[in-house]
Image: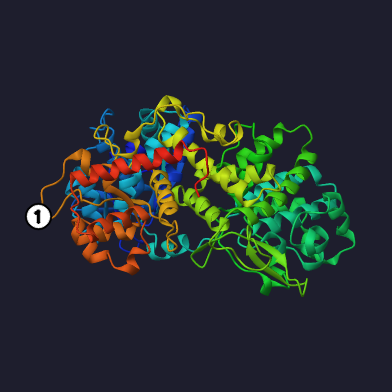
Amino acid sequence: MNDIQELTIKELLNSNEYRIPIYQRNYAWGLDETTQLIQDIADYAKDSPTNNYYIGNLIVFPRHKDNSLYFETIDGQQRTTTITILLCALKHNYLKYDLSWYSKVNLSFDHREKSNLTLFALYNNPETVNHGVVDANIMAVYNKAWSIIDKICQDKEISVSTFIDYLLNKVIILRISVPKDTNLNHYFEIMNSRGEQLEQHEIVKAHLMSPIKENQSAMAAFNLIWEACSNMDRYVQLNFSKDIREQMFDNYGTENIKISFNDLAALYNKNSDLGDEEKNHSLERLFVDAANNTPYRKPWEESTDKDQSETYHSLITFSNFLLHVLKIIRPDNKEVVLDDKRLTKIFKSVIKSEKDTASFSIEFIMKLLDLRLLFDKYIIKRKQDKWSLKKLLPQKADKDKYYYKDTFSQTEYEDDGSGQNRNIIMLLSMFHVSAPTQIYKHWMNASLYYVYNHRNTNATEYAEYLWNLSKVYMLDRYLAIPENKVPFETIIFENNGKSVNHDKDILWSNINIDEYPQKGEHVENFVFNFYDYLLLKETKDTDFEFSYRTSVEHFYPQHPTDKDPMDFNHLHSFGNLCLVSRGMNSKFTNNLPGAKYENFGDAKAMKTYSLKLKSMMNTIKKGERWDETKIAQKEQEAKELISKALFSEKQLE
């Protein structure tokens, strides 16, 4: 037996048996990791269809039992389990592709009966899944897998058949068999204690600094800005020392940049606050660190005024933010996409295309800082499980101290939580929770592009732009007939966030689940959240906020206990659907609407629900029947409210 074998995914799934040992952690991938995997495969299927895509390693230990060989999986179980789930989803949802060769699931879990039962049921017949005995993670990925594949293939303008062909025949996994005398416990310990590899953005940094490597002052200034921007969970001004901060930014170090790159570089020789670490961090050392996967201590980690900084959770990583900046300053470059898996490749391509690479590096680092300031001020963050949209300001009595207030507050010190600031938070969070995966943050790219080009925007103007953008998402993407769909980049950079389909027919079937081809939970989450925003404007519900509700729930269940199932069209109608959290989805299971209200309709729980679900619960609370007539009524009400909003020229009050 060869120690290392290259296997196509078809070969992996069609030969040998693989078992996940008990010492391995449970299946833990979610929708983000699954979406990224599908996106990577689709990218290669579109851009490099004749080349193989190496998906990673599968480390195994060969074992024999009852004269048969199987492989104990040491490393790579998350990826291989996900691929198995994807094939199950394709098998049941894309019938035009011949998967008859896929005759059984060849992956199992030692001593994890729930996982085995779930996986085998999904292969044979998803309708037979016992929701009382189910692996929630496996089930959650399966429920969304088909719609994610279908959506990404549409976005990439490739057929699902093309995607499957590439997945099965061009995606390669390296199966590596460890020697028979290997101490598996020790090996597994080593595998899980490996240090982090150097991140791609640090390699990009080295490439950007290369054109200015002869100018130590410029390199120091570049490094200072880069490292300050790389900490996405603090306001960027506070990642500089106080003295540098007040020389760089207006209003006592809190607002716009007031210094040029050359002036900042001039501080290199005379300001000790730049520190020895920056002075000694030469370009050569950066490349040596890149080769050795060696990180180094960040300059802002030595900041003396940490006590003034509040910690927020950024919605994107620094690597992804770099691509937002690059797309905004080079909007016509079609190679720039928001996929940080390709970060190094994208930047190398852009740098190569620039006539003056030194000027580009300086331009980029200053635009990076500029857009970080705009990001901190105009893009929501998470703080203690709440959405936040605030700006940094000096205190009136002591300019050396700072405070945070609503970006669009109407008074100097008081927050305006019930006014336009809250409205903008709602609009931004509506976009975000509908597409939490970073590669789909087109709305964020649009928002940053808008404030980048409208420096003096006020609350009314910004809210109007976001509201119009949400209508474009509905008209030009999610409710548009296929031939009228508009790419996100065209919406942002060519159409300026305005719809071109306002007089075209709406494809209302997109708010329901189609009977054939079976789309699973393919109704876009944004449609549900857009409808919740409309309900919010009607109800003025002060308890409501958008959160990560990612599971589509049938209020009248698909498999009711001791009750006949409802006909397909009413069951899968928008009137009977709502978004819930993954945990709530498993609790609702097959309960009828009355039981759902009795078990989960208390006032405290209702505060956490989507407004659509709250409306459904209130229907039961009022003693009304939840039947085909009520569902049809609810769908019609939704269509009328959505139509009124989409074709109104005015911003909702």
Residue extending farthest top? 483
Q: Quadrant of the N terminus?
A: top left
Left or right for 103, reference 423:
left
Q: Residue at x 53, y 54 (%)?
A: 423
Near-viewer residue (643 or 483): 643
Q: Look at the image and tell me whether residue 7 can be seen.
A: no
Q: Relative to the observer, which residue lies in front, 175 or 271?
A: 271
Would you say residue 489 is visible in this rendering? yes
Residue at image mark 1? 562
* Label tally: 1
> In the picture provided, is 59 more to the left or to the right than 87?
right
Q: Foreground: 18 or 3?
A: 18
Q: Nearer the viewer, residue 592 or 627?
A: 627
Give above or below for 486 relative to 614.
Answer: above
Residue 289 locus on image (x, y percent): 68, 55
Please determine whether, in this image, residue 468 is positioned above or below residue 460: above
Q: Quadrant of residue 187?
A: bottom left
Q: Secondary structure at mark 1?
A: loop
Residue 296 position, x and y percent, is 68, 61
Query: Looking at the picture, which amino acid does disc 1 mark?
Result: Asp
Q: Residue at x 80, y 54 (%)?
A: 221
Name the residue located 45 percent from the left edge and 42 percent from the top edge: 55
Q: How is the image coloured?
A: rainbow
Task: Categorize mark 1 by other alpha carbons within 10 Å: few (<14), some (14-19), many (20+).
Answer: few
Residue 569, position in %: x, y?
22, 38
Using the image, determine if residue 99 lies above or below residue 437: above
